[in-house]
């Protein structure tokens, strides 16, 4: 219960800093755009969608569902920006907690250091989650009302962005604790994302660089030991539907929980390392 | 009963990533503070006062020695439900009001409403911030933040309070109010551990004082022990004495200083003082008063620190 108050204060701090508020404003602009720009019409039993008067046409692809197409594009774009904005909005919360005068007050209270750290990280994720939920429900309602397609999987996929962010935040937490620098945490988080994307596609991108078994196994180990951000986003997107590029050519890929499981394990390891580091430092 | 106890407490900080250097902050400090005491910890900057308090609170880990607070060894965080702490530089969330700040920190202590709300209101009144209860902390002056900090430290009705420079930045009236609060807490049986540079204040309210320098404990004792000088007396006469009287007194004491009608004498034994008083009476000198000479804590502090450096 005591930790929940720390979560609450963290959300308020993120709101006060304005970055989360900016995030909220951007969400509202996108919601308003879709509310005004999206319209649908039905001719000969085929529903077509237009955005700002431009029709989203089937392009000869069988089973093309324009509503699903829009939701998937929105999901992919929104998830990318949620993660980017989310990191910018919350990366400072760990270093600011460690500032002289703040950390002394927290550590003098009857809370364990792990409780303080987890509450702080959870506060950052809940703040982002609230924004995300608001955005996803609003888009789901707009598309549902305007097209009659109530795509529940979109809501589920959007909700899955929250664990993705929580797993991703584990690296920000550890970097923030060690460096006590917001700028460095953000920079490292972005580089880390690029790195995990590369090792997610290591067979295509990294294996050809050096035909060596040890090198390949090291890449495999790195893949399983770090949160698989790009693979999780891709997998969650499959709950909505297929990418337009793959629709016509390949069998429909299915959602896989594995990237989430591997990422949960590696995030648990990173959070444990953070807690261990935090519990042994002098402040 | 010892509320705070340390034995050979040591701390060495290591700094630098590639070239590690070791900085000793505490060197075998043993202190015992009893219940209901106001205990002043004095020392120049970098003496190790804050490090000592932070070790007792679990904010810094010792490199050697042991310590107990409220009978509990260092480590478990549960004991902190009975501890209040005002850090030297404290930073409260600037977007909260004074009242909300107390509510938040009270929640971290596990205090629930309506007790918490009532206590926050009462404490804000006690530290003179009632009118500022609904004002955001970012608008507070340094002195007001100190008052809020003190209220925050008292929020959980602690058995022991650690106050690091509690009157820093507070105006003279505010300092007097804080001293009154601390003495009232002592009457309630609370133990107060006070770190301060304001020696006159420490002298005024502390029962016992410890002097630290460069991490080493130089002296521990009551304020009286530190400020009273053995065999040094002040004798005030009604009129300034003549030179012949002064030479007579000089012959009876080890050392004499005089300023107009005030004589400061240092004798070898108390009976020598009686001889001086008898001599003065025989010379028809009217004695207005005589008393053991007391020095200020500040003088004693400077003397101890200087000796320690020599």
Image (cartoon, helix red, strand yellow):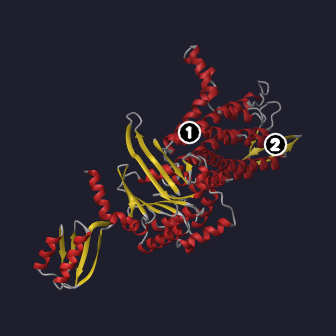
How crowded pointer 2 is (Cα within 10 Å; few <14, some 14-19, many 20+) is rated as: few
Res A222 quadrant in image: top right
Nearest to the observer: residue A141 or residue A10: A10
- Asked if the residue under mark 1 is in contact with the one under mark 2, i.e. CB atoms within 8 Å, the reply is no
Element marked by disc 2: helix
Q: Nearer the viewer, residue A186 or B286?
A: B286
Q: Nearer the viewer, mark 2 or mark 1?
A: 1
The residue wearing badge 1 is: A174
Q: Earlier in the sequence, mark 2 or mark 1?
A: 2
- How far apart in space, not on screen, are marks 2 and 1 (Cα)? 35 Å
Work out whether A55 lies above or below B228.
Answer: above
Q: Which residue is mark 2?
A: A152
B302 sits to left or right of B257: right
Q: Residue at x 69, y 40 (%)?
A: A163
Q: Chain of mark 2?
A: A
Residues tagged by mark 2 and mark 1 found on one chain of the structure:
yes
């Amino acid at each position: 219960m005591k930790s929940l108050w720390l979560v609450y204060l963290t959300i308020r701090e993120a709101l006060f800093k304005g970055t989360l508020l900016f995030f909220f404003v951007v969400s509202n602009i996108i919601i308003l755009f879709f509310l005004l720009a999206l319209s649908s019409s039905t001719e000969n039993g085929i529903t077509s969608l237009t955005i700002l008067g431009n029709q989203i046409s089937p392009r000869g692809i069988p089973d093309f569902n324009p509503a699903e197409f829009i939701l998937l594009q929105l999901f992919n774009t929104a998830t990318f920006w949620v993660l980017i904005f989310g990191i910018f909005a919350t990366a400072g919360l760990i270093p600011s907690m460690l500032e002289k005068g703040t950390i002394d007050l927290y550590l003098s209270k009857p809370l364990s250091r792990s409780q303080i750290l987890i509450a702080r990280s959870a506060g950052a994720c809940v703040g982002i989650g609230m924004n995300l939920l608001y955005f996803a429900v609003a888009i789901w309602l707009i598309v549902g009302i305007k097209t009659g397609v109530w795509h529940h999987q979109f809501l589920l996929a959007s909700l899955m962005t929250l664990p993705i962010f929580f797993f991703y935040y584990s690296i920000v937490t550890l970097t923030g604790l060690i460096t006590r620098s917001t700028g460095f945490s953000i920079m490292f988080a972005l580089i880390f994302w690029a790195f995990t994307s590369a090792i997610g596609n290591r067979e295509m991108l990294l294996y050809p660089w050096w035909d060596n078994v040890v090198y390949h196994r090291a890449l495999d180990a790195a893949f399983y030991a770090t949160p698989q951000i790009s693979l999780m986003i891709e997998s969650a997107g499959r709950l909505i539907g297929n990418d337009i590029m793959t629709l016509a050519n390949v069998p429909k890929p299915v959602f896989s929980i594995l990237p989430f499981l591997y990422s949960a394990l590696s995030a648990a390891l990173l959070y444990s390392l953070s807690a261990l580091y935090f519990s042994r430092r002098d402040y | 009963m010892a509320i705070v106890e340390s034995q050979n407490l040591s701390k060495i900080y290591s700094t630098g990533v590639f070239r590690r250097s070791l900085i000793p902050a505490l060197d075998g400090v043993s202190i015992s503070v009893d219940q209901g005491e106001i205990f002043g910890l004095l020392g120049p900057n970098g003496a190790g006062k804050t490090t000592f308090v932070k070790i007792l609170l679990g904010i810094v880990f010792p490199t050697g020695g042991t310590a107990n607070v409220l009978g509990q060894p260092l480590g478990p965080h549960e004991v902190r439900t009975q501890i209040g702490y005002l850090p030297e530089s404290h930073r409260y969330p600037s977007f909260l009001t004074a009242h909300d700040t107390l509510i938040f920190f009270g929640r971290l202590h596990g205090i629930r409403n309506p007790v918490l709300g009532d206590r926050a209101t009462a404490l804000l009144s006690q530290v003179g911030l009632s009118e500022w209860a609904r004002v955001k902390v970012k608008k507070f002056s340094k002195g007001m933040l100190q008052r809020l900090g003190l209220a925050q430290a008292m929020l959980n009705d602690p058995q022991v309070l650690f106050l690091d420079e509690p009157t820093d930045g507070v105006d003279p009236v505010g300092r007097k109010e804080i001293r009154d609060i601390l003495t009232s807490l002592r009457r309630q049986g609370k133990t107060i551990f006070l770190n301060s540079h304001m020696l006159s204040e420490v002298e005024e309210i502390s029962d016992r004082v410890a002097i630290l320098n460069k991490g080493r404990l130089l002296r521990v004792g009551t304020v009286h022990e530190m400020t009273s000088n053995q065999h040094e007396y002040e004798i005030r006469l009604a009129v300034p004495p003549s030179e012949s009287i002064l030479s007579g007194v000089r012959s009876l004491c080890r050392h004499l200083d005089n300023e107009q009608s005030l004589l400061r004498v240092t004798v070898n034994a108390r009976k020598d003082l009686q001889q001086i008083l008898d001599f003065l009476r025989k010379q028809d000198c009217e004695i207005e008063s005589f008393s053991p000479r007391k020095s200020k804590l500040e003088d004693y502090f400077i003397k101890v620190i200087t000796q320690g450096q020599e």
